[in-house]
Amino acid sequence: MAETPKLQTQIEIKPIQTPQPRMSAELNAEELLKEQRIPFPFFRPLSQRKENTWLISVFFILHLIAFGATMIVNDCWENSHTQCALKQLGRLDAVGALRLRYLVKDHQFWRLFTSPCLHAGVFHFIVNLSSVVFVGVHMEQEFGPLRVGVIYILSALCGSLVATLFLQDRPSVACSGALFGLLGATLSGLIWNWKIYSKKFATLMALLIISMVNGILGLMPYVSNFSNIGGFISGFLAGFIILFKPQVGQGYEAKTGLFDFNIKHSVKVKQKLDKPVLRSVSLVIFTLLFAGVAVAALQGINLNRYCSWCQYFDCVPLKWWSCSNKEMSCETMISSQQLTITCSDNGNFRVLPFTNISQARLEDLCNLICS
C-alpha cells in the first residue's frame, strides 16, 4: 500500500524590530511625526529630563561665592546683629558694585563684570537666584548649554552697561540683568516657535510673574532696574539669533505642562526655524544697540541729566528706605562697651554691643540706619 506523501510547509518568522527613539538631536517635523514624539513639555518635571544642566550650576556656584565674599566683607558672622539678614548689605563698593564716582572719575570699568555677580541682600539673593535656576535649567535642557551660556553672559554685560547710564552716587548691583536676559530669550523662543508650542499663555503668565517680582525688588536701593531692561532686550534679540532650533530629547508621554510641543501645528517647522532674514535683522539691531550703549558708558554719559523721573524707576523712596544720593551723617556715642549710632537726618538710632568698628563699616551702618 503506497504511503501518501506529507506536505511540509516552512514558515520563516522574523522578529519585529521596534524603532528605537533617537537620542538628543535637532529634528524637523517629519522626523517628529515618524517617531511619534508628541508632546514633550518645555517646563516639564526634571525627572523626565535626560540632559545635564552643568552650566547653570556653575553660574549658581559663582553667585554663591560672590555672596559669601560680600557677607565676609560685612562681617556678618560676628558683628551683623540681624543687619545682614533683614536689610540691604553694606560695603558693596568694596566687592565691585557700580557707582558713579568710581566709573566717571576713577574709570574702574572692571566693575561692569563684577556687579552682575552681586546681590543687595539675603532676600534679594534668594529670590533672584531661585528665578535664575528655574528659568535657566529649563532653557539649558531645551536649547543646550552653549546657546544659553552665550545669552546669559551677553545679557549680564548689556544689563551692566545700561545700568551705568542711569547711575546715582550710591552702590548699585546689576545681577538681575542675566535673569531678565533668560526671560527675554524664553519669550523670543516662544514667539519664534509660536505654532508648535501649546499652553503659550500659561507660559507668558509664568514669565510675567517672575518679571514683576524681580522688578519690584529693583525699586529698592542698591538694585538697578535699568540692568533688567538692558538684559531683557539683549536676551530677547539674542534669542531670535541663536534659538532657531530647539534641542529635542527622547520621546515623552503626553503629559500636560507649560510650553508643550504641539506636533499637529509643526508640519513646516523646519522652514519656520530657519528664517535667515529675522536672524540677520536681530543681529544687526543687537550689534548697534550694544555698540551704542558701550560707547556711551565708556564716555561717562549719564542720562539722568535728561530724564528727571528716571530715578524713580530705579528706586522709589518709602518709609522703609531712602533713595537719597547725599552723604549720610551720623553721631556716635560709646558707653558701657556699647556703641550708639544716631542718624542726623531722621533720628533713627541703633545700639551695638561692641565698639571695635572700622570707619568704613561705620559709614555703611550709618547709610543703613538713615535709609
Image (tube, rainbow, N blue to C red):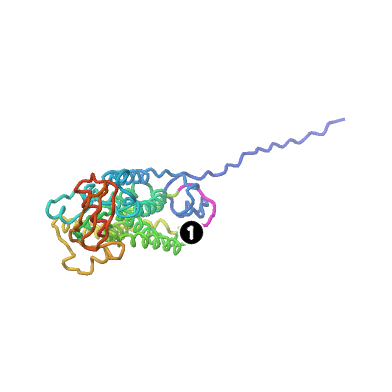
- Residue 48 lies in the magenta-colored region: no
Relative to 292, 28 lies left or right: right
Prevalent SS, magenta region: loop
Q: Which residues are the magenta region?
A: 249-256
Where is mark 1, residue-wise? 262
Among all residues in the image, which is located at the extreme front?
336
Q: Position of residue 135 (x, y in %)?
A: 39, 53
Q: Looking at the picture, which amino acid does disc 1 mark?
A: Asn
Tell me the element at label 1: loop
Density class for disc 1 (Cα within 10 Å; few <14, some 14-19, many ≥20) is some
The vertical placement of 14 against 178, above or below, is: above
- Residue 254 lies in the magenta-colored region: yes
The vertical placement of 297 against 71, above or below, is: below
Visible residue check, residue 112: no
The vertical placement of 166 against 60, above or below, is: below
Q: Position of residue 329 (x, y in %)?
A: 19, 58
Relative to 235, 264 lies left or right: right
The vertical placement of 253 against 306, above or below, is: above
Relative to 218, 203 lies left or right: right
Q: How many marks?
A: 1
Q: Position of residue 257 (x, y in %)?
A: 49, 57
Q: Position of residue 236 (x, y in %)?
A: 32, 59
Give 320 or 284, whichever is nearer the viewer: 320
Give 149 or 356, whichever is nearer the viewer: 356
